[in-house]
Amino acid sequence: MRQICRLLLLLPLLAACAAPRASEPPTLSAAARLRLLEAQLPEAGGPGEYPVLRRLAEAAPEDAALQDRLARAAERAGQPAEALAAQERAIALGGSSADRLAARGRLALLAGDLPLARRSFEAALLAEPGLVAAMSGLAVCHDLAGEPAEAQRWHQAALLTAPADWPVRVNYAMSRLLAAQPAEAARLLAAAEQDPAAPRRARHNLALALAAQNRPALAETVLSRDMAPPEARALVVAFTQWAAQRGRP
């Protein structure tokens, strides 16, 4: 009888020892940890996207798609060198698709690596000859290299392929401005004043082209769509000074 009582006393102790302690966190698989991290990503990007994607990429270093996403997030966070490194890893892991090569070219431009940007855009066009992002990017490379004729050839090709693409149009207009052709730049961007889909940068470049033509009042009207009149006026003065400096020998 005494042995039975001892056994009954031991059973609750054994059960307590076998049960997991409430204070101990459960052990999660790598896949579960990734899902939890991904759930922290803000909607439609945002300031918290970049650090979360960095942790995701560190947890799954062989995931090419995650490297693509990290590259985009790092670019939005103002980290061009890390964005470029992530895009390089995506290419190494998942292959050099035309889109990845064009993305690398854009990031190389942001990071100041003009030779890599040019090689990337050229390789992207070999893989997909009609890729607008690669044509426009290669045009910008020629602009930066001081080759306006070749730059405008690629700008024209990109615009013919995607006439409604505002970034392409903005790049082409800036090329015309750099070539001392402000009237042509203004023509390319004229629709930006009324088009709600036009980016703010398009209106700013339109104002720059108008200021370069000595049309400050119209330039101020365009800028006033995005800012208060005093700020617009001050920016027109700066644009006019920039245009005057460009016109000096």
Image (tube, helix red, strand yellow):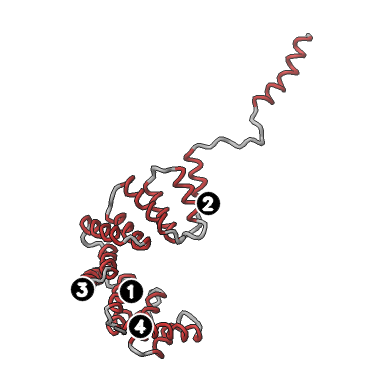
Secondary structure category for the residue under label 3 = helix
Q: Which residue is mark 3?
A: 149
Q: Nearer the viewer, residue 65 or 11?
A: 65
The residue that appears at 50% across and 37% down in the rendered structure is 29
Q: Amino acid at mark 3?
A: Ala
- The answer to whether residue 240 is above or below residue 32 is below
Which numbered disc flags the more N-terminal residue, 3 or 4?
A: 3
Q: Amino acid at mark 2?
A: Gln
Q: Nearer the viewer, mark 2 or mark 4?
A: 4
Q: Amino acid at mark 4?
A: Gln
Q: Residue furthest right?
A: 2
Which numbered disc flags the more N-terminal residue, 1 or 4?
A: 1
Q: Nearer the viewer, mark 1 or mark 4?
A: 4
Which numbered disc flags the more N-terminal residue, 1 or 2?
A: 2
Q: Nearer the viewer, mark 3 or mark 4?
A: 4
Distance between the Cα atoms at labels 1 and 4? 21 Å
- Occupied quadrant, residue 220: bottom left
The residue that appears at 46% across and 43% down in the rendered structure is 59
Secondary structure category for the residue under label 2 = loop
The residue that appears at 53% across and 37% down in the rendered structure is 28
Which numbered disc flags the more N-terminal residue, 2 or 4?
A: 2
| Residue 40 numbered mark, or none | 2
Q: Which residue is mark 1?
A: 170
